[in-house]
Image (cartoon, rainbow, N blue to C red):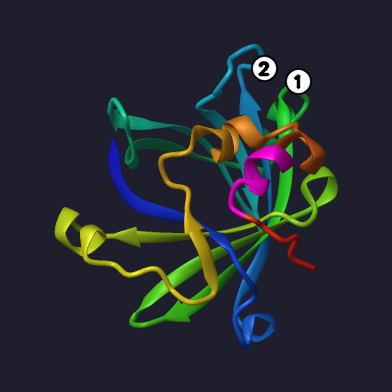
Amino acid sequence: METERERTFLLREKPKGLNRVKSLEIFDIYLPTKEKHPILRIRKAGKKYTFTKKKPLFKGDASIQGEETIILSKKEYEELIKIKGRRLRKIRYYYPFKKRVAEIDIYLDKLKGLAMVDFEFKNKKEKANFSIPDFCLVEVTQNAEIAGGILAGKGYKEIKSFLDKYSYQKIK
């Protein structure tokens, strides 16, 4: 199991030069469908296919996750996507920012207008000392309402009241 340390922010605005950085389309299916917060994910990211279980390592702290991933073949993925699950699609941009990479997710389909940013860290100190970039609105790392498994299958209207608390404006 790998340990992932990250902080998540709502995007205030697209940073300059975003359209010139590496990006790829991500398609996720979360399972099981009856769970409030599913933690199993089937993913297609470009031409890479994975099956992942991701969950917080410490109760009450979503910033440190345990992640177990199995690499899938295209044939395995094509069989697994027949499963009923909560789905979402987004474009992920790998934006360089102060010697690190901001993973900027621009959501599509029913979540169009939502955009978030993840930053990953090597250790606890690095994570704690990180300052929110100007292109970010607010940190939402600990807000379960915005976690991938909970967002999957929802539409923008269903999360609007959560976003309104932060005066979030849709990203175009």
* Image x and y of residue 153, in percent: 75, 31
* Viewer-closest of 91 and 79: 91
* Image x and y of residue 75, in percent: 70, 38
Q: Does the magenta stretch include residue 36?
A: no
Circle 1/circle 2 CB separation < 8 Å? yes
Point out the residue furthest to the right here: 109
**In the image, what residue occupies the spot 15% across and 59% down?**
125
Q: Mark 1 points at which residue?
A: 84
Q: Quadrant of the C terminus?
A: bottom right
Q: Mark 2 points at which residue?
A: 33
Q: In this view, does 99 lie above or below 47?
A: below
Q: In which quarter of the image is residue 135?
A: bottom right
Residue range corresponding to the magenta coloring: 160-166
Q: Is residue 85 above or below residue 141?
A: above
* Viewer-closest of 71 and 38: 38
* Image x and y of residue 136, in percent: 52, 68
Q: Is mark 2 on a helix, strand or loop?
A: loop
Label 2 Cα neighbours within 10 Å, binned few <14 / some 14-19 / many ≥20: some
Q: Mark 1 or mark 2: name the one nearer the start of the chain.
A: 2
Q: In which quarter of the image is the N terminus?
A: top left
Please identify, in this view, whether the residue under mark 1 or under mark 2 is nearer the observer.
2
Q: Is residue 164 magenta?
A: yes
Left/right placement of residue 126 relative to residue 111 reads left
Q: In this view, does 73 lie above or below 144?
A: below
Left/right placement of residue 63 relative to residue 80 reads left
Q: Is mark 1 on a helix, strand or loop?
A: loop
**In the image, what residue occupies the spot 31% across and 29% down?**
60
